[in-house]
Amino acid sequence: MSSRPELQAPPEIFYDDTEARKYTSSSRIIEIQAKLSERALELLALPDDGVPRLLLDIGCGSGLSGETLSENGHQWIGLDISESMLNIASERDVDGDLLLGDMGQGLGLRPGVIDGAISISAVQWLCNADKSSHEPRLRLKAFFTSLYRCLARGARAVLQVYPENVAQRELILGFAMRAGFSGGVVVDFPHSTRSRKEYFVLTCGPPSLSTAVPKAKGEDGESCSDDESSGDEENQTVSISDRHRPRKKQKITKKGRGREWILKRKEHMRRKGNTVPPDTKYTARKRKARF
Amino acid sequence: MFALRGRRNPSLHRPIIEDLEKKIQKIHLRVLFSQGTEMRLLTHNMLSSNIKGVTNGFPLRVEVEKMVEKQVDFNADFLKNMFTKIEWKALFDAAQTMGYTDLPAEAESSMLDSDEFLKKFHHALLELHLEEGALICPETGRRFPVNKGIPNMLLHEDEV
């Protein structure tokens, strides 16, 4: 039933050549990715002075999200574990630099050089153990500590994730806090099933006014049908909650079938010519409870 | 009801179509002039080896098999912003290995006012691209291969 790619195969195997091409040629995915990365960039809250910054795109894939960064004039470095995705990014001639790497092994970057980091739908992969050597907790720890180290002081990281459940969200956020980040979760369109999107907005350094978590979209009655595609999708959502119908209730009366019914059946069998034991005081007698 | 409202009014869809057309044009242009992505020295200057136990994984030594030069838009603000973050010695050495010797061995922030210096800085940082070769960890000598301009920084299990 699950369509979550994380549950199907490790990322470097799931995003093989065919899947990578499929991913990058789907106009729906391109549009969603562009929207998500635009919002992530907005949440990054870079100073509005027109100076291009050096950003990091974690799980850049084929560079769809990086394109938004380039369009806004920033330089970026993209990291991904899938070689096929990176090859497509390279074919598409994206403006950023690409690295083949595993975020769970830590980011090999110098301290304090990155002005901001975004990640679109990638970090939840860390919660899976795809190899015997993988320990999700250690990988999350390695990722967040190295991310904290390479970001400049006061810089933000905006991670858009699809946590599977509350526990997973807590796990990811817990490791982010332990690494020294402050911040929290911004949930856009919390009342919608399809357009609901979660962003972890993390700031390097202790909590302060500037690290206050920004406001989410569509929180108080603001309708999300202004982007009509999501409105469409929402109406298509099929409720699967009562797919498992309860079994037909068996008719069980308290009394059971009783002596009368048994005598009637026996008479019936006798008339048919079968050999039937005689009716006695023991017929249809109730058994003792211990039986 | 809500779903249909958008469908019936074609004007709502026009911006999306125009957007797509623009994107398609862009993709076409890219295909025509595309040569793939390569690694810039900017990225090299940020990278360090994170093998377990390595205390100083910077700078990675560059091994050049194939390199290209590309024209990139000049932006003085970006260079000034980046200057404080760049390890000049590493950039100088890497540029030398790539065959660019015009860069001064020492640099100070006062030199940022000179256009000539900025041009050289820009060329070294953003226009020298490594396509094939390797990056080598200064401490362990581990080789990180660079294929089609993408450095493979994946670690083996015993290096994590």
Image (cartoon, coloured by chain):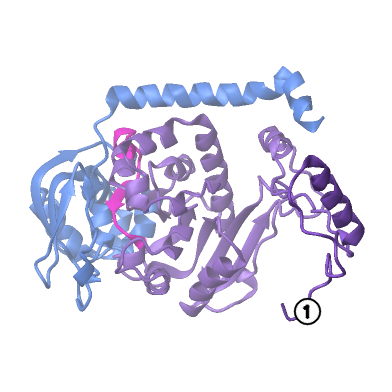
Chain colours: A purple, B blue
Residue B151 in view (yes/no): yes
Crowd rating for badge 1 (residues with CA inside 10 Å; few <14, some 14–19, many 20+): few
Is A16 inside the magenta-drawn segment?
no
State how many labels appear: 1
Segment tinted magenta in the rendering: A88-103
Residue A267, position in %: x, y? 86, 49
Q: Quadrant of residue A109?
A: bottom left
Mark 1 secondary-structure assignment: loop
Residue A45 in view (yes/no): no
Q: Residue at x 42, y 26 (%)?
A: B26
Residue A91, position in %: x, y? 30, 33
Q: Residue at x 29, y 48 (%)?
A: B115
Is A100 inside the magenta-drawn segment?
yes
Q: Looking at the figure, which quarter contains the C terminus of chain A?
A: bottom right
Q: Is residue A251 left or right of residue B153?
A: right
The front one of A144 and A213 is A144
Q: Which residue is mark 1?
A: A289
